[in-house]
Image (cartoon, rainbow, N blue to C red):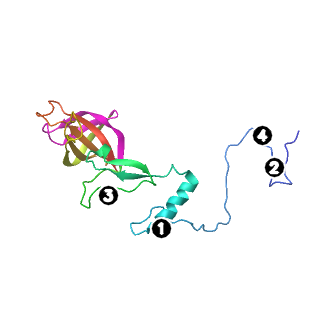
Amino acid sequence: MQPPERPGFPDQRFDPGFGFEAVRLGVTAADPLVPRQTGFTLSAAATREQQARLTDALRQRLGSGSVRRLRPVESHIPEQAVLSDTVDDAPSAWPPSRDLPLRPPLLLPKAEPAEDVVAVVPDGPPQRFRWRKSLHWVSHTQGPERIAAEWWRERQPKPTRDYYIVEDEAGRRFWLFREGLYGREASHPRWAVHGFFP
């Protein structure tokens, strides 16, 4: 029994037999493809009308509750400083117009413990740490940035955090913190990885 004719091959029968070893595609002529969209992000100079058009187009395609934005909140605790809102919510006036400390674009949902941390002095920057079973030797550090607990919001304030931007020997940049001031809040401060820099 012969296989049926394939579309595009009216005069030939196609029988793959035992299958294919390789397939080759040859392009004899190609025309340039002009992009319809040259960028996705809106610049700071974009008008409100342009922003509204983009938002409306995305909501029509994805659904009204699917388009969200990050909104800053009046908190200096990193995991509480930004909320995800729908675009219908009113914008916030926070943060004030001042230079803010460098923050990583990727923050972990929850800080993950760093183990086997070695520092020259107990309250100094890390020299090495183990995270997700991989040992990282630190080549450069920046910091610390000290972030105290919001004692006016919590009955039991959390320990103070000292954040460091560290770069390992492979060039990966982490945002690490030591939780608890050595000798005052903890005898053995806890270390954790909280985010990454590109």
Query: From the viewer's perspective, is 132 left or right of 128?
Result: right
Dot 1: element: helix
Q: Which residue is mark 1?
A: 49
Dot 3: element: loop
The tag earlier along the polypeptide, 3 or 2, is 2
Magenta stretch: helix, strand or loop mostly: strand
Residue 119: x %, y % from top left: 17, 38
Q: Residue furthest right?
A: 1
In three-dimensional space, the C-alpha distance between marks 4 and 1, rounded to whole angstroms, equals: 60 Å
- Label 3 or label 2, whichever lies nearer to me, is 3
Q: Which residue is mark 2?
A: 6
In three-dimensional space, the C-alpha distance between marks 1 and 3, rounded to whole angstroms, equals: 20 Å
Q: Is residue 21 magenta?
A: no
Identified by mark 3, the residue type is Ala
Which quadrant would the N terminus be assigned to in this image?
Answer: top right
Identified by mark 1, the residue type is Glu
- Label 4 or label 2, whichever lies nearer to me, is 2
Discs 1, 3 touching: Cβ within 8 Å: no
Identified by mark 2, the residue type is Arg
The disc at residue 93 is 3
Q: Which residue is mark 4?
A: 17
In three-dimensional space, the C-alpha distance between marks 1 and 2, rounded to whole angstroms, equals: 51 Å
Q: Which residue is at 57% across, 66% downward?
A: 36
